[in-house]
Image: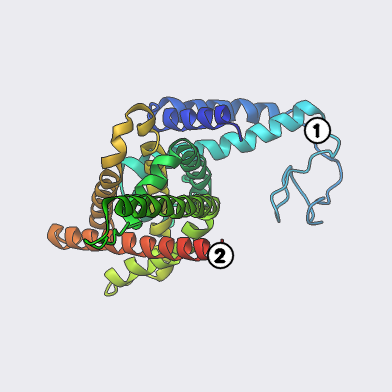
């Protein structure tokens, strides 16, 4: 995907997040009504057998699988109308879910727990959709700031040791030995940078798989923190999907900031962690109704455990990737 296409998608994401909470949903509903009106002019089949599952169709839709009993050979206009109907139905749910995801931490999870699942997008669908945005944003960020990222990691991980030269050696010998050592160190650092670059490329390529693999472990952390509550593990997994979706959108927005303020890279990571911890605390309070001091302690503990689990997983992945290259 080109840089222009990525930038356009990121711009669309930013505009969606800050768009008026009444105008866009109303627009989607209006478009859906117009499309539904257009779909009423589609030609339905006279036969009463469903082409998808073979069940008996008594109305316009199959009672078994829900497929409309339309003619097979539809024209381009009808095909476009059908696509737009599905798209705006999905899009309106996404917008309707996105706003409470940011403004009411824990609300979508509570609604899902209570069985109110028609008005909002499914947690897994939301997660997958946001993951696409997250991958585009982080890849776009890395391709522009890869040197800064690698330099930061090299600075923290590669320690250059300077062996002392014997005092009896002449100044010329010291100079030659020092020059040879520096040249050898540069070669080793270049190799390390090349290996790190390959490892980072593999990391960003497989990031979506790594994060998805970690979801059950994140849910287990929440389960253990509220082990005395009568909640099933899958309920904590639903909360994890909503939390991860919020984090992905937050990070997708955060990685755009260095393009405007390059110096922000120094404090950006800490700021994201603080925001996530506050979000977890508010959502814990909303979902579990514990006193604030217990909620805050568990939120801090949850943030530490989540960061630790993520760090260990990424460290193991990078180590295996570097050793295998």
For the residue labelled by badge 2, is the local secondary structure a helix, a strand or a loop? helix
Percent from the top left, x then y, of residue 150? Answer: 41, 47
The residue located at (64%, 34%) in the rendering is 85
Q: Is residue 52 left or right of residue 95?
A: right
The residue located at (50%, 61%) in the rendering is 322
129 over 35 or under it: above or below = below
The residue located at (57%, 29%) in the rendering is 5
Q: Is residue 111 left or right of residue 174?
A: right
161 over 73 or under it: above or below = below
Task: Tell me the mark number nearer the camera, choosing from 2 and 1.
Answer: 2
Percent from the top left, x then y, of residue 16? Answer: 44, 31
Image quarter hosting the N terminus: top right
Question: What residue would you read off at disc 1?
Answer: 43
Residue 133 in view here? yes
The one nearer the camera, 79 or 188, is: 188
Question: What residue would you read off at disc 2?
Answer: 324
The one nearer the camera, 220 or 101, is: 220
Residue 28 in view here? no
12 over 310 or under it: above or below = above
Q: CA distance from mark 2 to mark 1?
A: 59 Å
Percent from the top left, x then y, of residue 238? Answer: 42, 59
The one nearer the camera, 60 or 118, is: 118
């Amino acid at each position: 995907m080109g840089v222009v296409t990525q930038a356009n998608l990121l711009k669309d994401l930013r505009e969606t997040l800050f768009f008026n909470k009444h105008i866009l949903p109303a627009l989607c509903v209006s478009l859906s009504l117009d499309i539904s009106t257009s779909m009423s002019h589609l030609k339905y089949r006279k036969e009463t057998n469903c082409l998808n599952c073979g069940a008996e169709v008594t109305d316009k839709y199959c009672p078994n699988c829900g497929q409309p009993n339309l003619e097979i050979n539809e024209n381009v206009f009808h095909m476009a109308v059908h696509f737009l109907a599905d798209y705006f139905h999905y899009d309106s749910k996404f917008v309707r879910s996105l706003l409470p995801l940011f403004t009411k931490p824990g609300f979508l999870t509570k609604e899902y727990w209570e069985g109110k699942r028609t008005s909002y997008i499914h947690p897994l669908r939301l997660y997958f959709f946001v993951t696409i945005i997250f991958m585009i944003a982080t890849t776009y960020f890395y391709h522009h700031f890869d040197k800064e990222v690698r330099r930061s990691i090299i600075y923290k991980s590669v320690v250059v040791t300077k062996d002392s030269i014997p005092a009896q050696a002449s100044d010329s010998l010291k100079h030659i030995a020092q020059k040879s050592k520096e040249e050898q160190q540069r070669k080793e650092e270049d190799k390390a940078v090349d290996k790190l670059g390959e490892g980072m490329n593999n990391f960003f390529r497989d990031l979506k798989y790594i994060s998805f693999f970690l979801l059950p472990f994140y849910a287990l952390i929440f389960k253990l923190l509220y082990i005395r509550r009568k909640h099933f593990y899958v309920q904590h997994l639903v909360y994890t999907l909503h939390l991860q979706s919020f984090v992905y959108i937050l990070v997708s927005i955060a990685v755009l900031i260095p393009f405007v303020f390059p110096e922000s890279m120094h404090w950006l990571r800490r700021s994201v962690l603080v925001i996530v911890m506050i979000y977890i605390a508010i959502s814990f309070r909303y979902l579990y109704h514990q006193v604030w001091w217990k909620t805050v302690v568990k939120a801090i503990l949850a943030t530490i455990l989540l960061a630790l689990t993520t760090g260990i997983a990424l460290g193991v992945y990078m180590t295996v990737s570097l050793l295998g290259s």
